[in-house]
């Protein structure tokens, strides 16, 4: 069972990440580099995925905050909001998008539902084509494929950002959290 699940998850993740258009990838990179501050939000496991990415962006030297943390400053029109939601219907993500857009912030979402409320509330949508079939329920329940695919996409973006920012792993290590 383990091997079948692993093989299924690997293939589905690869297919989902490959479904992201090159235009979406380029637009996302451009926004990450041009906007003053980056705000990331997701609920539940999507939030954890967003936090993974936030850590990497901080290590790259970018100004990043996770929406909902007590130290998160107010968002402005010069900023970028990155929202992660499989269904695109999570109320807190949709509300965050609506508030950010009202302020004038650029909102980009990652979702498997391009016609969702979140997609409609966003300036840009990164669509991950996540198949839903009977094998998904057996080998990768709930949002597993979406969440893992977003992690892979985010991790694949990091080397591109490193190159554009002229930041090496040694440079990133200097910003790596050290707990003593």
Image (cartoon, helix red, strand yellow):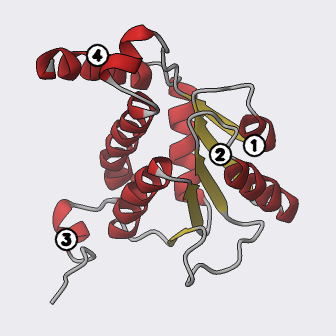
Closest to the observer, 143 or 31:
143
Instruction: Specify the label residue 106 is tagged with.
Output: none
In this view, the residue farthest toward the top is: 134
Question: Could you tell me residue 111's position as x and y percent?
Answer: 59, 34
CA distance separating discs 1 and 2: 6 Å
CA distance separating discs 4 and 2: 26 Å
N-terminal of the pair, mark 3 or mark 2, is 2
Q: Are marks 1 and 3 in contact (CB under 8 Å)?
A: no
Question: Could you tell me residue 110's position as x and y percent?
Answer: 57, 38
Image quarter of residue 106: bottom right
Q: Are marks 4 and 1 in contact (CB under 8 Å)?
A: no
The residue singled out by tag 4 in the image is 11
For the C terminus, the quadrant is bottom left
Q: Nearer the viewer, mark 4 or mark 1?
A: 4
Q: Nearer the viewer, mark 3 or mark 2?
A: 2
N-terminal of the pair, mark 3 or mark 4, is 4
N-terminal of the pair, mark 1 or mark 3, is 1
The residue singled out by tag 1 in the image is 123
Residue at horizontal 55%, vertical 43%? 28
N-terminal of the pair, mark 1 or mark 2, is 2
Closest to the observer, 35 or 121:
121
In this view, the residue farthest toward the bottom is: 180
Residue at horizontal 53%, vertical 23%? 21
The residue singled out by tag 3 in the image is 173
Q: Are marks 1 and 2 in contact (CB under 8 Å)?
A: yes
CA distance separating discs 3 and 4: 32 Å
CA distance separating discs 1 and 3: 33 Å
The residue singled out by tag 2 in the image is 108
């Amino acid at each position: 069972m383990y091997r079948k699940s692993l093989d299924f998850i690997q293939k589905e993740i690869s297919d989902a990440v490959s479904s992201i258009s090159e235009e979406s990838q380029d637009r996302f990179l451009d926004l990450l580099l041009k906007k003053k501050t980056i705000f990331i939000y997701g609920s539940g496991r999507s939030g954890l995925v967003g936090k993974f990415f936030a850590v990497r962006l901080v290590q790259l030297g970018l100004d990043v905050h996770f929406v909902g943390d007590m130290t998160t400053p107010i968002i402005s029109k010069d900023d970028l909001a990155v929202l992660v939601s499989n269904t695109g219907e999570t109320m807190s993500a949709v509300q965050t998008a609506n508030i950010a857009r009202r302020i004038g912030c650029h909102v980009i979402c990652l979702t498997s539902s391009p016609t969702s409320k979140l997609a409609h509330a966003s300036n840009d949508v990164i669509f991950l084509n996540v198949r839903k079939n009977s094998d998904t329920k057996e080998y990768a329940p709930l949002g597993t494929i979406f969440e893992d695919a977003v992690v892979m996409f985010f991790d694949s973006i990091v080397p591109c950002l490193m190159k554009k920012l002229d930041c090496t792993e040694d440079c990133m290590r200097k910003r790596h959290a050290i707990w003593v």
